[in-house]
Amino acid sequence: MRDVAQSELFDAAVSSLEITDDTDQKLAQAALVLYVSTDDFTALHGVTGSEAISSIRPWIDDDELLSRFAFQALTAAYLSIGAPPLWSKDRLDQFDGFNESDPLEVASIAAFNNDEQSRNWSTPRGDCGENKRPLYLAVAARRALPIS
């Protein structure tokens, strides 16, 4: 990540960030889409990092600076895994649509496997909104349930 952070592509990408009232939600969604699209361990850190940032945000005085650093980290992660193509909205909807998993089953299996992310993502999340919950559940199911 350090190497890509020194590239011109990185500089161009991070300078394009426009801070708005919903920047933190958009960054969390971008991290989730990156992980869904790639199933990459580095991308997983983008999701868990976004969750961690969300939990400390109330105690940070400079919200804009925190968003800029979060975007830099997510951009570096994306570039370090080769800037893979992200799934389209249709592909994301298809992934959601095929998920008919019972959240309690996913949470139970994740707990048995000591998979904290899947256990957390299979339960309703007050901070992510109802429209994002199905995508979190689909990812949790992909991680926790055996492929049939």
Image (spheres, rainbow, N blue to C red):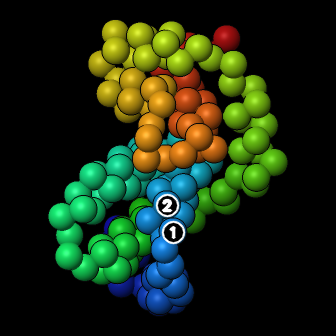
**For residue 123, side relative to residue 100 (left or right):** left
Residue 79 appears in the figure: no
Q: Which residue is mark 2?
A: 25
* Spot occupied by residue 91 in the image (x, y as percentages of width and height): 77, 45
Name the kind of residue labelled 1 in the image: Asp
Q: Position of residue 73 (x, y in %)?
A: 36, 68
Task: Please give the name of the residue rendered at 45% of the width and 26% of the height, measured from the top-left corner.
Answer: 123
Which residue is rendered at x = 48% and y = 26% of the image?
122
Residue position marked by numbered label 1 in the rendering: 22
The crowding category of the residue bearing disc 2, from other C-alpha atoms within 10 Å (few below 14, some 14 to 19, many at least 20), is some
* Residue 82 placement (x, y as % from top left): 53, 63
Label 2 residue SS? helix
Quarter of the image where one finds residue 56: bottom left
Q: Secondary structure at mark 1?
A: loop
Q: Nearer the viewer, residue 12 or 26?
A: 26
- Tell me, yes or no, if residue 116 can be seen here: yes
Look at the image and tell me in which quarter the N terminus lies.
bottom left
